[in-house]
Image (tube, grey):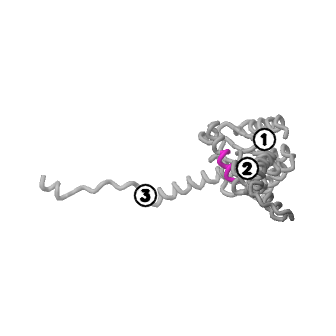
């Protein structure tokens, strides 16, 4: 994986849309200690099966006990190899560990606590991607284009061709959010304005905001005409006579 290229993509997209982007890439999210135990049990079971089907009659059980220790050690050693290790880890375990590690790294860096940047977490061993979108960019609905780009990014990550898919995904989700919920940017850059205008998004946002303002003004004037002048509080005649 070209880490330098990924860093360049993050910098370019961040400047283009005035949105901080944080991308964390880790070799693995956890050591998965349970996989070592499961591997040892697997090798131990194979050892016992081999001795069970051996035609020789072994009277002394000390041989079984003596060979159990090397079988356990062999299982521990084999669990060090990633491809073999994955056979003893469930998908739910990898999913949970990746998510928890993504949360931990995000809060340690202050990314999730501040909630102002797009945060993406990658784990090479599990081949999983965790995405955290800030509240300013959370979409009401994700379009099919964003979903397809996200799936393409994951497939490319598994195959080793990740950089171009990452850039396409950034473009898809940022443009889609600007289109769906008209995200307000306090200080947009000139390049971001040009991109939105080229996509036809900025003009739509301006027109919709102008229409909304005109509707609000019309409603206010109509309500004032219906209500008429503000009534004055009634004078209490009985109290006045007693005075």
Reply above or below: 77 against 15. below
Foreground: disc 2 or disc 3:
2
The disc, 3 or 1, on the residue closer to the chain's N-terminal end is: 1
Q: Residues within 10 Å of mark 1 (few under 14, many from 20)?
A: few
The answer to whether marks 2 and 3 mark residues whose Cβ atoms lie closer than 8 Å is no
- Magenta span: chief secondary structure: helix
Q: Earlier in the sequence, mark 2 or mark 3?
A: 2
Judging by the rendered image, the residue that carries numbered circle 3 is: 228
Whether residue 24 is visible: yes
Mark 1 — residue? 194
User: Residue 106 vs residue 191: left or right?
Assistant: left
What SS does tag 2 mark?
helix
- Mark 2 lies on residue: 36
Q: Which one is in front, 184 or 197?
A: 184
Q: Is residue 200 visible?
A: no
Query: In the image, is residue 99 part of the stretch drawn in magenta?
Result: yes
The span picked out in magenta is 94-102
Name which residue lies at 83% across and 61% down.
50
Q: Residue at x 76, y 51 (%)?
A: 66
Location of residue 206 in the rendering, given as x and y in whole percent from the top left corner: 69, 48
């Amino acid at each position: 994986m070209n880490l330098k290229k990924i860093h360049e993509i993050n910098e370019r997209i961040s400047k283009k849309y005035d949105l901080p982007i944080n991308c964390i890439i880790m070799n693995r999210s956890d050591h998965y200690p349970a996989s070592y135990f499961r591997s040892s049990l697997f090798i131990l079971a194979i050892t016992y099966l081999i001795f069970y089907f051996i035609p020789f009659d072994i009277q002394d059980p000390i041989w079984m006990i003596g060979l159990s220790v090397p079988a356990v050690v062999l299982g521990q050693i084999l669990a060090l190899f990633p491809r073999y290790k994955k056979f003893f880890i469930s998908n739910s375990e990898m999913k949970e560990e990746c998510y928890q590690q993504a949360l931990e790294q995000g809060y340690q860096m202050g990314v999730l606590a501040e909630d102002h940047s797009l945060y993406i977490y990658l784990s090479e061993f599990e081949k999983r991607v965790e995405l955290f979108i800030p509240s300013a960019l959370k979409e009401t609905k994700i379009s099919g284009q964003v979903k397809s780009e996200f799936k393409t990014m994951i497939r490319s990550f598994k195959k080793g061709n990740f950089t171009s898919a990452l850039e396409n995904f950034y473009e898809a989700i940022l443009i889609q959010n600007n289109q769906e919920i008209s995200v307000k940017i306090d200080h947009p850059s000139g390049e971001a304005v040009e991109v939105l205008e080229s996509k036809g998004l900025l003009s739509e946002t301006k027109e919709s905001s102008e229409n909304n303002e005109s509707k609000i003004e019309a409603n206010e004037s109509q309500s004032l005409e219906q209500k008429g002048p503000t009534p004055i509080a009634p004078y209490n005649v009985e109290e006045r006579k007693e005075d």
